[in-house]
Image: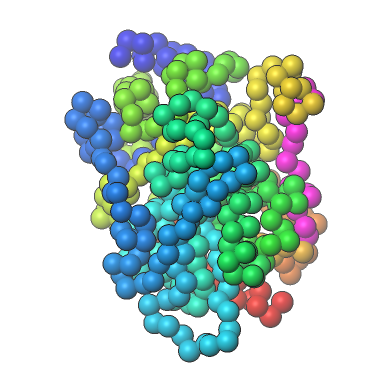
């Protein structure tokens, strides 16, 4: 513990590291006693994820058909992918192919996070009941996507990736698979990191020829305006150091002892109030159900790579959307041929790609100021191809767990997708 407290002193002087911690804690909605609920007290054990897949655990039990698929990326990761081909009530639309929709979760969670509310309130089942062919992605490193053609998840090489690789390998592999199965262009829904990797992909010309339209919920592209309670603890100077040298970890596992002890220590830091971390970090979510939060704590968080968390911290620190910075010009030259990491230029996104952007006035992670910067990137976008929704009372978690998200957000997403049919 003394060692961990020593790291806290370093954190107080390291802006990108503290931002990293903020990003980690975003997905841990608990009060001060939350450390006794299975995630942060290694001596008491951790919650064991269900062995059943998402289809069995969260879809078929509600009367929906569901298929489990596997997709292998070009760099060898084997990803879990679920398909809900139709709603509970099969529509009499023989001869009409159902429009495919791919749903992508954010960081430190997996596809299960979309199913925490009942069928009439969660996005995948709402889309299925509205006639869509729904596909749910699970990022590399999460519980059902921890396999590789040559690497074991217990070795560091398995975790040598950041969200750059999600842009270059995961999303393209999933799009290729869904497109191959359906023969149709794909609608896309992303939340948080799911919006970041989509935007970066679009900017490089990936996916756009297989994409019909995209809905971006609580979008993350710029993080420089992020203002959270724990952000006050953030440091006053920047230390360019690898977080792996602190934790000695390639896998960033919030349920593991090193990360758990570190996060628990943060709550003892002067001025940090951990009574309600969800509000302190993501903003005051208006519309969460206590039982949904309990389900969240039973199923999440999930592992990611430490390198991925560093990359997110760099994104927040630098205020630009760029590839992973290896910390030294010569290392960057080795990887990119230039001394500074290349930028993802969002102005390269095709101006005629239909986009729906929904953001909240209380979201402390996807801050309104940062969303304004993102929208400024779309200033030359075709006016009739960009739809923007601002929800004054919504914060970050409301978009995936809000009890009224169907009425406020999801119905708008469905209407947006259906408008593309006649386009």
Among the 4 quarters of the image, the one containing residue 314: top right
Q: Residue at x 42, y 76 (%)?
A: 87
Q: Is residue 230 magenta?
A: no
Q: Residue at x 71, y 77 (%)?
A: 423
| Magenta segment | 338-351
- Colour scheme: rainbow
Residue 156 appears at what percent x and percent y?
A: 48, 25
Q: Nearer the viewer, residue 164 or 415?
A: 164
Residue 259 appears at what percent x and percent y?
A: 37, 26
Residue 352 appears at what percent x and percent y?
A: 77, 64
Residue 400 vs 320, above or below: the answer is below
Instruction: Classify the position of the N terminus by image quarter.
Output: top left
Q: Is residue 340 magenta?
A: yes
User: Does residue 410 appear in the picture of this structure?
Assistant: no
The total number of labels drawn is 0
Among the 4 quarters of the image, the one containing residue 257: top left
Q: Which secondary structure is most common in the magenta stretch?
A: loop
């Amino acid at each position: 513990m003394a060692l961990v407290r020593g790291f806290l002193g370093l954190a107080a002087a390291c802006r990108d590291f503290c931002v990293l911690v903020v990003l980690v804690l975003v997905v841990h909605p608990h009060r001060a006693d939350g450390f006794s609920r299975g995630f942060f007290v290694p001596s008491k054990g951790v919650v064991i994820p269900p062995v059943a897949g998402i289809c069995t655990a969260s879809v078929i039990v509600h009367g929906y058909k569901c298929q489990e698929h596997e997709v292998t990326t070009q760099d060898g990761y084997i990803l879990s992918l679920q398909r809900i081909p139709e709603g509970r009530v099969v529509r009499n639309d023989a001869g009409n192919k159902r429009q495919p929709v791919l749903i992508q979760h954010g960081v430190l969670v997996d596809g299960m996070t979309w199913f925490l509310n009942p069928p009439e309130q969660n996005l995948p089942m709402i889309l299925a009941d509205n006639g869509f062919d729904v596909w749910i992605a699970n990022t590399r490193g999460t519980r059902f996507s921890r396999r590789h053609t040559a690497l074991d998840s217990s070795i560091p090489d398995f975790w040598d990736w950041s969200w750059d690789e999600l842009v270059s390998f995961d999303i393209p592999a999933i799009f290729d698979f869904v497109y191959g199965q359906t023969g149709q262009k794909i609608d896309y829904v992303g939340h948080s990191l799911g919006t970041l990797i989509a935007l970066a992909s679009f900017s490089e010309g990936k996916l756009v020829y297989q994409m019909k339209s995209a809905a971006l919920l609580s979008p993350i592209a710029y993080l420089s305006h992020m203002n959270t309670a724990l952000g006050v603890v953030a440091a006053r100077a920047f230390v360019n150091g690898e977080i792996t040298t602190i934790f000695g970890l390639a896998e960033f596992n919030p349920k593991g002892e090193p990360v758990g002890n570190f996060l628990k220590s943060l709550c003892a830091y002067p001025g940090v109030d951990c009574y309600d971390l969800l509000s302190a970090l993501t903003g005051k979510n208006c519309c969460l159900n206590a039982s949904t939060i309990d389900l969240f704590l039973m199923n999440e968080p999930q592992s990611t790579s430490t390198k991925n968390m560093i990359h997110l911290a760099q994104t927040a620190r630098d205020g630009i959307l760029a590839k992973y910075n290896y910390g030294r010009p010569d290392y960057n030259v080795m990887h990119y041929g230039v001394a500074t990491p290349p930028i993802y230029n969002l102005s390269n996104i095709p101006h005629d790609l239909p986009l729906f952007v929904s953001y909240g006035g209380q979201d402390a992670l996807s801050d309104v100021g940062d969303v304004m910067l993102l929208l400024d990137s779309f200033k030359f976008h075709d006016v009739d191809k960009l739809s923007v929704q601002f929800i004054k009372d919504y914060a970050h978690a409301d978009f995936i767990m809000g009890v009224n998200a169907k009425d406020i957000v999801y119905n708008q997403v469905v209407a947006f997708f259906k408008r593309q049919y006649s386009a």
